[in-house]
Each structure stands twice: as C-alpha cells, then as structure tokens.
Image (cartoon, rainbow, N blue to C red):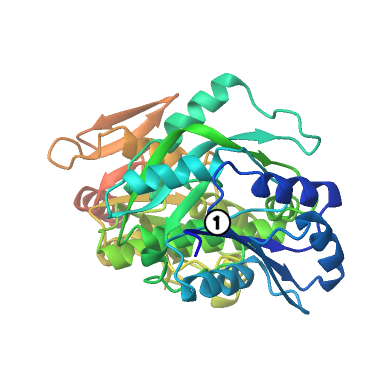
C-alpha cells in the first residue's frame, strides 16, 4: 500500500486550472502515493477528471451529487484514507501548481522528524490568475520569516500555508475539519494542541490568488462572507486559548451611548477585528437592549460580553464594568475613540511595556508606544485595572463635588 494519501476536493473551476493542478500532482518525483479526488456535488465534471488522470492506477475518484463544501469533502476523503492506513495525509486545490519535489521534500522531512512532529510545511510562491508572479523576492523573504516561527505563533496568524503534510496518527485524534472559511487554520490550531510542527524554508508550489472560483476570492469580494470568516477566526482563537488554559491579556471596554447605532457598529468592528485577539470585549451599554442587538448582530464572537447601565453616567458605568473585568490590564474605547488600525493593540503587546511592576499605562504618541506611571487619558490607553478604577473613581468624586 502507498505511504501517502493526497485528497483533492473538486467543485466548479476553470478547466485549464484543474488540468494543470492534477497533472502537477501526477508528475511528482515521489511516486508512493494515492490520489483521492472527491467531486463535491459537481457530477458533470467526472468526464473531465477521468480525462485528466488517464487511467493512472494511483488515482481514486469518489463523487456525491450535492455540494457540501470543502470541509465536508476533506473529511470524506481523509476518513477513507485513514481507514485504509495511510501514514501521511495532505490535500491539494484545483487552481494551484505543485512542483515536482513537493511531496518528496515534505515526506522526506517528515520521515526524518521526531514522532512528535505532526505537520511539516514549506514556503510557497504566489501567482496571479494569469500565472504571473504576484510578489517580489523581498516579499518572499518576509513570508519565509513569518512562517519560520514556533507553533504558538499560529495564534498570531496562519503561518503554515497551502504546502503541508500531516502525520495521520494525529489527524485521527482531532474531530476533522469544522469551519466553512478557515478549514485548515482551525484544524492546525487543534492539531498543535497535541503535536509539533516543522518548517521547510523553500518554495514547493504556486498558490494562485484572485482565482474567480477560489474561496479566498469569494471572501475578499463579499462583505458578509468576510464577516463570517472573521467570526470563525475569533471563535477558533477563543476555543484554542480555552483548551490550553491561557489567561487573557487585557479587557477591552467599549462604551455605547444612546442613538449611535451605525457609528457604534462600525467602531465596535474595529475593536473586534484587532489582530491581537487575546482579550475579552465588554460592551458597556448606556442604551437599550434593542439598540445593542442592532450593533452586535453580525458579530458572533464568544469574547463579547454586554453589561447594561441605562440612565447612568459613563464614569459610573465604567467603574462598575471595571470591577467585573477579568484581566489585569484594561483599555477603553467608544464610538469616537476606536482606532481603524488593526495592529493597534498588538503593537501595545509587542512593545513589552505591559509590565505592571514598572508601568501603569501605555498610550500611543505619534507612532510610538509610551509608558507612564500615571494615567491622563481615559480612552485608547492600556492601563493596569486598579489604576483605571482609581482614575474613574476620582472623576466620579470630582463630579459629585
């Protein structure tokens, strides 16, 4: 029996892309693999697939009549291959190009790796729809640096990419692919609970961007799908930290005043979609439940909590909310103070200034993060919670006097 199982989910795609993708898999220098093509609800593509494989005995084709999506197709294919005892598994797309050494390099690296390594992955080139290179040498150098990090960096972003192979024994221990838009990313987060990863610093494939039938293109061009994709990312991050018992880094408090539904919706999105996701988000509501529901409706995010303080002052509501915050550091936003830059809170984290033993607050001055032992600004300032409580209490006392 072959050592490696390769799955290709097939749905509607440019015929020339399908032919090229299949041919580059069949032309691999490493020959000891089975190629399982799963036709996902597009039975009229069967003749095309058969003509592409030319009777190659390494290929199996399975087909079902109704489209179920990539996650279903991958689970369907992986279960077949795992039941048959394949040692390594990977999957490929119908619009990418795989170099002849793609499988050989990944398999040989996995063979030499420690048994704790469950994912081997490499760098990759990106090409436009027409096949021309999409990026410069400098970009590829930056991409390699981004990918060449420990597995814990997966919580900062998807460092693995489309060129990879799995050790099947670890695939058996996770519950398959779950999400519609971030299938691999969520899968790798769950796999790395129980295994290590290893990076190969060489490009082994061309990843086609802006392909008209690709999932990434559909996400980029559809606001609703883009929102659903980010919801999946936030859920995957949250669940990963819950599984691993990781404490949250900070509490973000977002104050909502009456009559600002549209603006609050937009600004809350800026906070929810910050690249630094290790936080809780407390919506501090001075308005009605109906307005809050309108504001948060598209954000299905387990980090969000809502606290209602209708007919109270902002400072009173913040003081009450701060007592219920779960992190040692807090930051306050509202509809006028919510930076559009998604790196804002991550740069605060990476400044290495969030040390409560040395600093009480961190704020941005021009393009730099500045630490202080006091707090002068209520909004957009990362502050030790006890210091923030004292600051708000002082404002309340001043108002009473």
Report if residue 95 is visible in the image: no
Say whether residue 346 is visible: yes
Q: Judge by depth and name the residue closer to the eye, 64 or 152.
A: 64
**Above or below: residue 224 compared with residue 82:** above
Q: Is residue 163 above or below residue 284?
A: above
Residue 401 x, y percent position in the rendering: 27, 53
In the image, 317 versus 373, the foreground residue is 373
- The residue carrying mark 1 is 33
- Vertical order, 124 against 32 (above or below): above
Would you say 354 lies left or right of 344 here? left
Work out whether residue 72 or residue 115 is closer to the camera in this orientation and state it.
115
Which residue is depicted at the point 79% across and 61% down?
Answer: 49
Q: Residue at x 47, y 31 (%)?
A: 144
User: In the displayed structure, does residue 5 sit left or right of residue 356?
Assistant: right
Question: Relative to 197, is 80 above or below?
Answer: below
- Horizontal arrangement in the rendering, residue 73 relative to residue 16 (left or right): left
Name the spot of residue 268 as percent of width and height, x first: 54, 56
Q: Residue at x 46, y 62 (%)?
A: 187
Where in the figure is residue 247, as x and y percent of width and height? 25, 58
Element at label 1 = strand
Q: In this orientation, which residue lies closer to the viewer: 253 or 28?
A: 28
Q: How many marks?
A: 1
Which residue: 56% across, 25% down? 139
């Amino acid at each position: 029996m072959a050592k490696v199982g390769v799955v290709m989910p097939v749905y509607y795609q440019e015929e020339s892309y399908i032919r090229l993708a299949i041919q580059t898999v069949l032309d691999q220098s490493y020959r000891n693999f089975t190629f399982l093509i799963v036709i996902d609800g597009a039975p009229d593509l069967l003749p095309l697939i058969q003509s592409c494989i030319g009777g190659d005995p390494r290929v199996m084709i399975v087909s079902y009549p109704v489209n179920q999506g990539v996650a279903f197709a991958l689970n369907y294919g992986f279960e077949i291959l795992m039941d048959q005892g394949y040692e390594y598994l990977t999957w490929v797309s119908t619009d990418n190009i795989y170099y002849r050494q793609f499988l050989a390099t990944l398999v040989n690296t996995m063979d030499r790796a420690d048994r704790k390594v469950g994912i081997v992955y490499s760098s990759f080139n990106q090409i436009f729809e027409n096949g021309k290179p999409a990026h410069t040498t400098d970009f590829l150098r930056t991409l390699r640096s981004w990918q060449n990090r420990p597995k814990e960096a997966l919580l900062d972003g998807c460092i693995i990419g489309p060129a990879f192979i799995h050790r099947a024994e670890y695939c058996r221990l996770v519950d398959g692919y779950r999400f519609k838009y971030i299938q691999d990313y969520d899968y790798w987060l769950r796999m790395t609970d129980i295994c290590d990863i290893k990076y190969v610093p060489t490009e082994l494939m061309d990843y086609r961007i802006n392909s008209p039938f690709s999932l990434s293109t559909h996400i980029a061009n559809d606001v609703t799908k883009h929102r659903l994709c980010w919801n999946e990312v936030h859920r995957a991050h949250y669940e990963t930290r819950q599984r691993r018992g990781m404490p949250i880094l900070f509490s973000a408090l977002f104050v909502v005043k009456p009559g600002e539904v549209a603006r609050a919706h937009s600004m809350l999105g800026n906070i929810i979609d910050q690249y630094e996701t290790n936080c809780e988000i407390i919506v501090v509501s001075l308005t009605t439940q109906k307005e809050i529901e309108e504001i948060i409706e598209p954000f299905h995010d387990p980090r969000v909590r809502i606290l209602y303080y209708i007919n109270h002052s902002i400072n009173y509501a913040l003081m009450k909310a701060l007592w219920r915050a779960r992190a040692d550091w807090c930051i306050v936003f509202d509809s006028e103070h919510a930076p559009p830059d998604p790196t804002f809170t991550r740069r605060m984290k990476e400044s290495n200034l969030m040390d409560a033993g040395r600093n009480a607050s961190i704020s941005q001055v021009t393009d730099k993060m500045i630490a202080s032992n006091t707090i002068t600004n209520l909004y957009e300032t990362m502050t030790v919670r006890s210091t923030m409580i004292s600051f708000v209490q002082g404002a309340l006392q001043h108002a009473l006097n």
